[in-house]
Amino acid sequence: MKFLFSSLMLFTGILCFAQDSYQSIVLKNELTEHANAILRDEQVLIEIEDVDDMTITTKRVVTVLNKYGDDYVRAYDFYDDNDAKIKKQNALVLNKLGEEVKQFKQRDFKDQSAVGSSNLYSDNRVSYLNYSPADYPYTVVYESEVSMSTTVFIKAFQPINNYFLSVASSKYELKNPNHIPIRYVETNLDSIQVEKKVSDFELTYTFKNIPAYNYEPYSPKVANMAPMVKVALNDFSLMGVEGSASEWSTFGKWQFENLLKGRDELNANTIAEVSELVKDAANDYEKAKMIYEYMQSKTRYISVQLGIGGWEPILASEVDRVGYGDCKGLTNYTKALLSSQGIKSNYAVVYAGNEQKDIDPGFASMQGNHVILNIPNIAEDDVWLECTSQSMPFNYLGDFTDNRHVLLIKEEGGEIVKTPQYTCQKNLEETFCKIELSEDSFTATVKRESKGISYGNNYHIQNQKEKDKNIYYKEILGNLPGIHINTLNFENNKDQVSFSEQLDFSGKKFHTTAGNRILLPLNFIQPEIDAVTRDEDRKYPIEILRGFTNKDQFDFKIPEAYTIEALPDAINIETDFGKFSFSVEVADDDPRLLQVKRSITINEGKWSPNQFSDFREFLNKINILSNQKAVLVKNG
């Protein structure tokens, strides 16, 4: 009894300690389920003293449960020499009992450039905690204070923006004693525990007990489902340049006047050179294409994070002189070249990346991470240019900037428009295979043509090293044993935005033998369709950002000693999610030639969670039916 009493007292002591500290051996199940890390306590205080005076004070306590949670610590802050200053920064590491492991003062943090290796020069830097844990779980208590003169960016309140992170408590407070008008927008707050206090000039939000989002196949990105509050000032400053705006038209005009105006001048020699280049062009579309390819041939991408907060492009004349620039500089340079020939174009700010993030059409603020170029009125649809690539075709964006809202910055004001969508019909791969079989080997010729997003995924193959090409194709043809690639040929038709590959190769037999019969797999190249497991408790919608169509034909020349005994029936499936068809026939003029045709279309779209079982069944049927076999029997 004495031992039991002592144990109970010890356990009670641990529980009390857990309430007053950050020990992590006793945690709520709803916060640990599906979590790699837990945001125990976050407090973000934003104090707006003036349109050019803001201080952000942060306390962030994260318990990391396993090695996959290390990235959620996020003990870092950005700064630069001219605008943002880190006034305070420290961290404390605790073990699972809440005991101190190590303290870090500001001088102990690592410091490095905040941009990648392609950067030429930049004053943006990051000061971050560099800690390698000896054991899990562990907890990091991070505190910082950063002052800055730029107020055009107000940190949004979004404690969760990825899977496998739960939140015990997160508080966001904006103080605004000078009553500068603010705007804010709330999303996805209905399903969480939230305390809020808002007024015309200040606001406070506290989110509590948000379980981790558990990844489900084909689910939307967490940022589109998690709670968030976005905030902006109507009067603001960007590196000392002040402005006022509450909607996109005036905000875009402010950007044009302060970031772009007067930066598109070119010297007379360059204008004369371009005029000579396009003098025989039939129309403005041809002129624009020539100018784009001219720009690609004489420039290269290098990041240059200077100017007004890194948002102002370097002068077009400077890009012309040195032959390099970042996305802003190269886009502005291309715009200037086009303007010299009377072709109007628009500088377009976008969120780049394959997840299709939008500039929010309903909330004017400084957004985006990339710049592209829009050319109206020279074709049936607007022309779009990615100016940082030396290899992309004219009027092709690919999955880096497709199908999303962007901001056009015009002299008359800003305008939100959408970039082109590559539909499942446009994202087309067509493959034609000729396969000659023997009893113990085969030879084959494969021709594949890629268009739409598939073009962007595949055209780079031609520039890889021979060793990497061989590895790539052996992975694609992984269902075929003993592959030896004999020849590879490529054709990149930029005018048609079409990429063609031809492979000649041989391999060991991929069929099975049963007595005097051959069981021949008819899908020579396996479809790239994920096998999806059953999920009776699906929570999130099904989302396919980009659909595609694959059309394949496999012509099998069977060995002379064999005849065809049995063939599978034709298949045709149509659903909301896409279509699948499969057929096999003997050629009319050759009894030894089997012609297999397969077509797969996966639609882009979004569907409710209760449709997941139908979606899963459709995908799994494609995989199962792609294992169809023909039966060949040996003569005599």
Image (cartoon, rainbow, N blue to C red):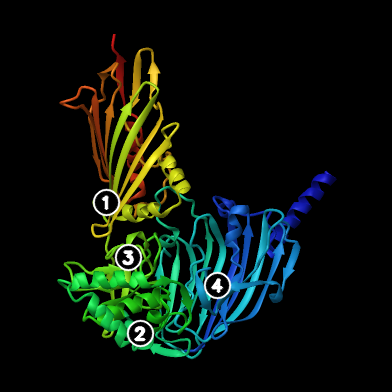
For label 4, the SS is loop
Residue lying furthest top = 636
Q: Could you say where residue 545 lies in the image, as x and y percent from the top left?
A: 34, 55
Q: Earlier in the sequence, mark 1 or mark 2?
A: 2
Image coords of residue 548 (percent x, y): 29, 49
Separation of disc 1 and disc 2 at Cα? 37 Å
Residue 114 image label: 4
Distance, label 4 to label 2, CA atoms, is 24 Å
Residue 424's disc is 1
Q: Quadrant of the N terminus?
A: top right
Q: Are marks 1 and 2 in contact (CB under 8 Å)?
A: no
Task: Measure the alpha-carbon separation of dots 3 and 4.
Answer: 26 Å
Report crowding for label 2: few under 14, some 14 to 19, many 20 or more residues within 10 A (C-alpha).
Answer: many
Which residue carries the number 2 mark? Answer: 260
For the residues labelled 2 and 3, the Cα–Cα distance comes to 23 Å
- Mark 4 vs 2, N-terminal side: 4
Which is nearer the eye, 222 or 256?
256
Q: Residue at x 55, y 67 (%)?
A: 170
**Crowdedness of circle 4 by 10 Å Cα count: few (<14), some, many (20+)?**
some
Nearer to us of marks 2 and 3 is: 2
- Identity of the residue drawn at 37% across and 75% down: 330
Q: Amino acid at mark 3?
A: Arg
* Mark 1: secondary structure: loop
**Kind of residue indicated by mark 2:** Leu
Give whichever of 568, 226 is nearer the camera. Answer: 568
Is 420 situated above or below 262?
A: above
Residue matched to label 3: 404
Mark 3 vs mark 4, foreground winner is: 4
**Viewer-side label of 1, 4:** 4
**Given the image, on which type of amino acid does mark 1 rest?**
Cys
